[in-house]
Image (cartoon, rainbow, N blue to C red):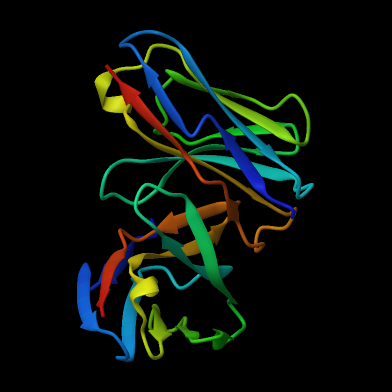
Amino acid sequence: DAMVIQNPRYQVTQFGKPVTLSCSQTLNHNVMYWYQQKSSQAPKLLFHYYDKDFNNEADTPDNFQSRRPNTSFCFLDIRSPGLGDAAMYLCATSGRTGGNEQYFGPGTRLTVT
Amino acid sequence: KQEVTQIPAALSVPEGENLVLNCSFTDSAIYNLQWFRQDPGKGLTSLLLIQSSQREQTSGRLNASLDKSSGRSTLYIAASQPGDSATYLCAANTGFQKLVFGTGTRLLVSP
């Protein structure tokens, strides 16, 4: 089945220690997104890639970076995690046009100690 | 700036009851509206997508309606089951590849 896969499902990192979260997709979608969802809050868009074009949200901290080496993979790098970065990180994909449905992965739960 | 609100924040019903979840948005200029289900600690599962030109969409026991002029969408769940217990999120697609989410309705269906 075509899907969005996130690894790892659970990640524990230390305060200030860089961490990378991974997302892959078999849907061959052009657009890939990263969302941050804190407990009992709505998902918040951090950035997205439209093909190779990176689009950062204005309020996304510089501490968060992303890479998309090819159509299938996208990475979220947190350069110096703080306690406030503990959250569920959700990856999503969609087709080329703006009105297309977004498909989400299972998420990575990040804990910062 | 688009804002999405969901009422109620939490809902508890006995099994078998029909129920309605509400979603309102402030800017009617949307591409579509998407309803999701989220189980505790899990990702989002897309339930229904209503394009801006549509009035409603149905999938099994679920029916979603959209009234752009009033900035409202509803998700109707027929004959609720304990397995329907989850958080339901609506999200307005404002274009430019952006979804604006509501904070969700937490549903508990008791046997």
Number of marks in the rendered image: 0
Q: Is residue B30 visible?
A: no
The quadrant of the image that shows the C terminus of chain B is: bottom left
Give residue B10's quadrant in the image.
bottom left
Q: In screen coordinates, is A43 left or right of A15?
A: right
Please tell me whether residue A66 is drawn above or below residue B45 in the rendered image: above
Residue A95 image position (x, y, % from top left)? 73, 54
Snapshot quadrant of residue A109: top left
Q: Relative to residue B61, is residue B25 drawn left or right?
A: left
Q: Is residue A21 above or below residue B110?
A: above
State whether residue A66 is above or below residue A15. Answer: below
Residue B103 visible in the picture: yes
Q: Position of residue B76 (x, y in %)?
A: 40, 86
**Rendering coords of residue A67 (x, y %):** 64, 23
Judge whether B104 appears above or below B13 on screen.
above
Q: Residue at x 47, y 81 (%)?
A: B68
Kindly identify the residue that appears in the image at 27 percent across and 44 percent down.
Answer: A39
**Residue at horizontal 38 percent and vertical 90 percent from the top:** B79
Closer to the camera in the image, B69 or B91: B91
Q: Quadrant location of the N terminus of chain B?
A: bottom left
The picture places residue B82, in percent across and down from the top left corner, at 33, 75
Q: Which residue is located at x 58 percent, y 37 percent? A: A6
Residue lying furthest top? A17
